[in-house]
Image: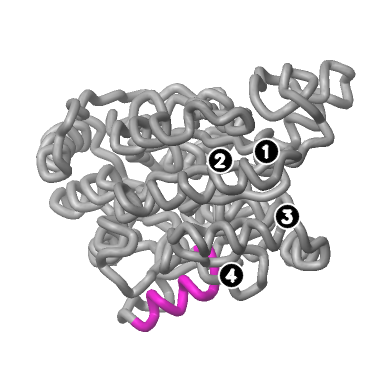
Amino acid sequence: MKKILFIAGTRPEAIKIAPVYLAMKRRHKFDPILCATGQHSDLMRHGLEPFGITPEISLDTMRSGQPLHRLLGMLFQQIGDVMAQVQPDVVIVQGDTVSAFAGGWCAFYEKISVTHIEAGLRTGNLHHPFPEEATRRALTIVSHIHMAPTDAARQNLLKEGVPARNVVVTGNTAIDALYMTLEKRSSLAADGSTSHPYPKPYGSASHGYPNTARRQILVTGHRRENLGTGLQNLCEALLHLAKNFSDVDIIFSVHPNPAVDGPVRELLGSTANIRLVPPQDYQQFVDLMADCYLIISDSGGVQEEAPALGKPVLVTRTTTERPEAIERGANRLIGCETNAIIEAATELLTDAGVYQKMSAAGCPYGDGKASQRICDYLEGLPVSDFIG
């Protein structure tokens, strides 16, 4: 039996690791252990609870106002202690967070094999996104098995000299998590429970929202490169849209980072058809995506999930490591300038042909079986072959 240690600290990591962790739980050849680093403890809980997962290990690393280098130091110390205690055969990290970086490099220092889920994403710009682009490049150096979500990600890794035998194209586990959540919603609705089988205080007239006929724009924003001017530009654009489209409601899921929460509430808090809502658990957020008309976001996960729901995404970034949906036409990269956001959103709200083309473009990020492929590969690989 292979002892697998998952390292995760943020909501996106929790959501994308959950299907793999659960798939391993169902197999007799794995002993999966989840270590929650405490990087974003409340948000990570939002990602895990809908899947019924409780971490076996929880760390205490986050401090108010803590800069990244101090967080990283805390993570190295505590994750290193966990590895000495657990002595895993394999460490699995996901994506490009500080927790993933610390988990991968701690494992490397202990000569433990590292498997990187969602490997090979690149923008080519170390400062966009910051610091994620540097983090994922650094993880490639110490990882032995690279689970690439798309062939484009695989090609990025091959160009950097990663041996082809160590790269597996799996699809993105975000789609697994999305399909699992939609299936749960459908099965409960089929049982006659309710069309919304979990608390959903925002986005539906059946739960007190103004009008089912009103179109909804779902908004998120949290990238460091968009803090300050970019966030202000976004808010000014939303104010314009709210004023000029009286039939539209804007739902902004506000990140708890004070650099996001404070300015957003100050600029948008008194506008009648803008609702500022706290971060939702994953089931609730999927419901918001399913109900909305379009999405404005700088989130990586939303870029993957929304095309599977037929929801156009206006990506408020200048670069993206997920070009597949841009190339297909499901998402549009627009930057974070006020006029660009207004123009792109206005077009989708007024031109049904443009909207339908984006909505029908489809999802290039997987078929919901990425977790199965990851488990199949790792199950068939002798432990002695994990370290290359």
Residue displayed at 17% across by 43% down: 68
> Sequence order check: which comes first, mark 3 or mark 4?
4
The label number, if any, that marks residue 326 in the structure image? 4
Residue bearing the label numbered 2: 19
Residue at mark 2 to residue at mark 3: CA–CA distance: 35 Å
Of residue 306 and residue 335, the one placed in the foreground of this image is 335
In this view, 165 is above or below 341: below
Question: SS class of the residue under badge 2?
Answer: helix
Answer whether labels 4 and 1 touch (C-beta < 8 Å).
no
Question: SS class of the residue under badge 4?
Answer: helix
Residue at mark 4 to residue at mark 1: CA–CA distance: 25 Å
| Residue 102 in magenta stretch | no
In this view, 128 is above or below 237: below
Residue displayed at 33% across by 40% down: 7
Question: SS class of the residue under badge 1?
Answer: helix
The three-letter amino acid code for the residue at tag 2 is Pro
Left or right placement of residue 262 versus residue 292 in this view: left
Residue bearing the label numbered 3: 349
* Residue 371 shows in this picture: no
Residue bearing the label numbered 1: 180
Q: Position of residue 153 (x, y in %)?
A: 46, 71
Answer whether labels 1 and 2 touch (C-beta < 8 Å).
yes
Question: SS class of the residue under badge 3?
Answer: helix
